Amino acid sequence: MDVSAMPQIFSSPHSWYSTTLASATISEISTSKLSSSKLIYSYTKSINGFSALLSPSEHAAIMKSPGFISSVKDMSVELHTTHSYEFLGLNSYYGAWPKSDYGRDVIIGVVDTGVWPESESFNDEGMTEVPSKWKGECQAGTQFNSSTCNKKLIGARYFNNFIG
């Protein structure tokens, strides 16, 4: 959303997004259909916008809203692998894999829709201590206890912010 198009009456982008979404919902209800819209999260740091559950007609209404720039449909994806080195095509005998001491003290960040710390993928047996340069945290979330982080799953953040 283009925040320069936000009317001055709104105290924050979040209140503007909520109202924009509510107007799309009212439009949906007036056509005698059950509204499915739900604001999930407001973004104001790197980008300005929001994520929401929308019906096709609600999406069409949002697209006509002042300040609308673009939208991206969230897609469900299948798990590719639990063996990152194989997935990345790393060779055990030459190249980046052995040069990096097979990932020793390498921190890899992943944006994920959920994590199962109980999975064998997160077994930290044989792992070295968490690198001292790590400044992240292991934050509790819905059905996730921060005590399940270990030397392999060293950080987690919870960004699923359902409102209303």
Image: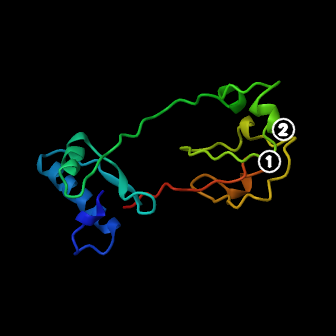
Q: Which mark is residue 105?
A: 1
Looking at the picture, does residue 83 appear above or below residue 141?
Answer: above
Viewer-side residue, 105 vs 33: 105
Q: Position of residue 9 (x, y in %)?
A: 22, 75
Q: Is residue 34 visible?
A: no
x and y percent of residue 37 in the render? 29, 50
Please tell me in which quadrant of the rendered image residue 158 appears.
bottom right
Name the kind of residue labelled 2 in the image.
Asp
Q: In this rendering, does residue 82 appear at all?
A: yes
- Residue 26 picture quarter: bottom left
Q: Is residue 72 above or below residue 3?
A: above
User: In what quadrant of the picture does the N terminus appear?
Assistant: bottom left
User: Residue extending furthest left?
Assistant: 31
Mark 1: secondary structure: loop
Left-right relation of 163 to 148 = left
Q: Is residue 52 left or right of residue 121?
A: left
Side of 65 where 144 appears, left or right: right
Q: How is the image coloured?
A: rainbow
The residue lying at 36 percent from left, 55 percent from top is 50
Q: Residues within 10 Å of mark 2 (few under 14, many from 20)?
A: few
Residue 155, percent from left and from top: 68, 54
Judging depth in this view, the residue of 139 and 106 nearest the camera is 106
| Residue holding disc 2 | 101
Could you tell me the amino acid type at mark 1? Asp
Image point (45%, 62%), residue name: 45
Q: In the image, 38: left or right of 87?
A: left
The quadrant in which the C terminus is found is bottom left
